Image (cartoon, helix red, strand yellow):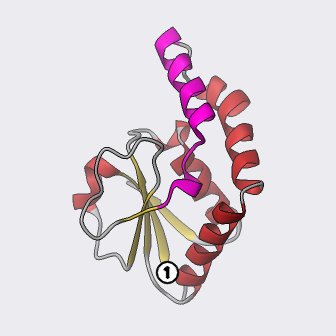
Amino acid sequence: MNGTLYCVCISRIKDLPDIDLKFFAVRVKKFLPDGWEYIDSLAPSKRLFSDTQNFKKEGSWNEESFQKFYKPRFRDEITNNHQAKADLKRMVLELRSGKDVAFACYCGNHQICHRGIIGEIFENVGFQVIYI
């Protein structure tokens, strides 16, 4: 039986059940919670992060800008990054072995965040994903 992928805002990690493998994927790492592994290959690039911050400053960061601008660029970034592919494969192997995996970042709303894209990728290949 496969494990479950938990996509979680880092402020809500206390709400997680016992997790076997915990990934923290952010561009600006302010801290690393105990027991978590930092993987920058599955965080947005510096350029994408900067461009997103500009959208937020302009007040134009929303579902539409996420779908049209962010999502295609992030998918392209991880598709063309060997380390990202290796990290995704590692997550797949862990999940297939029955282990639960957590994937966390700072964003509160996974629907306009790379965490939601990662969750969607795993949902599309049949894994159970829970968003917290």
Q: Quadrant of residue 125?
A: bottom right
Hey, which residue is sitting farthest top in the picture? 58
Numbered circles on residues, count: 1
For the N terminus, which image quadrant?
A: bottom right
Residue ID at (60%, 69%): 87
Q: Nearest the camera: 95 or 30? A: 30
Q: Magenta segment, principal secondary structure?
A: helix
In this view of the protein, which residue sits in the foreground, 28 or 14? 28
Residue placed under numbered mark 1 in the picture: 3
Instruction: Please say whether residue 40 is one of the residues in the magenta stretch.
Output: yes
The percent position of residue 129, horizontal first and vertical second, equals: 52, 64
Which quarter of the image is occupied by the C terminus?
bottom left
The residue positioned 58% from the left and 85% from the top of the image is 96
Residue stretch in magenta: 39-59
Is 23 situated left or right of 13 in this image?
Answer: right
- Secondary structure found at label 1: loop
127 falls in the magenta region:
no
What amino acid type should be assigned to the residue bearing mark 1? Gly
- The x, y position of residue 105, in whole percent, is 41, 49
**Please, is residue 79 above or below residue 82 in the view?**
above
Residue at image point 52% right, 54% down: 40
The image position of residue 6, as x and y in percent, is: 43, 64
Q: Residues within 10 Å of mark 1 (few under 14, many from 20)?
A: many
Residue at x-position 65% and y-position 64%: 83
